[in-house]
Image (cartoon, helix red, strand yellow):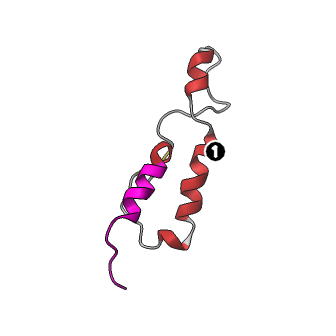
Amino acid sequence: MLLPGGATETGMTPDDTAEAARQSLPRPEVMCPPVLFLASPEAAGVTGERIVARDFDAWLAAFGSRPRAAG
């Protein structure tokens, strides 16, 4: 499962949302790095994971340090 990590700044943000709150929302592009990773050969065998795009760098570092099954 790939989640953005909360609400994102999109055209669906209510008009009455305070500007300060809008500025703190991640851009939709936060999804790009994990999507590209998941579409790559490096992601072979990734299953049953909950990946939060906002925390993708930390997830990827932890994933990279896990032992891999021989194959």
Q: Specify few, some or many for label 1: CA neighbours under 10 Å numbering under 14, 14-19, or 20 or more.
A: few
Q: Is residue 70 magenta?
A: yes
Q: Quadrant of the N terminus?
A: bottom left
Q: Which residues are magenta?
A: 56-71
Who's the residue at 61% across and 52% down the image?
32
Query: Where's residue 35, x and y in %?
Result: 57, 57
Q: Is residue 46 magenta?
A: no
Query: Where's residue 16, x and y in %?
Result: 61, 14
Direction from residue 20 to residue 45 in the image, left or right: left
Numbered-mark total? 1
Q: Nearer the viewer, residue 29 or 67?
A: 67
Direction from residue 15 to residue 55 in the image, left or right: left
Is label 1 in a helix, a strand or a loop?
helix
Q: Nearer the viewer, residue 46 or 12?
A: 46
Q: Is residue 26 above or below residue 38?
A: above
Direction from residue 18 to residue 51 in the image, left or right: left
Residue 62, visible in the rendered structure: yes
Who's the residue at 63% across and 29% down the image?
12
Direction from residue 66 to residue 35 in the image, left or right: right
Query: Where's residue 27, x and y in %?
Result: 62, 37
Q: Is residue 17 above or below residue 38?
A: above
Residue under pointer 1: 29
Who's the residue at 58% across and 54% down the image?
33
Residue type at numbered disc 1: Glu
Query: Where's residue 28, x and y in %?
Result: 62, 41
Q: Residue furthest bottom?
A: 71
Q: Is residue 6 above or below residue 32?
A: above
Q: Quadrant of the C terminus?
A: bottom left
Residue 2, visible in the rendered structure: no
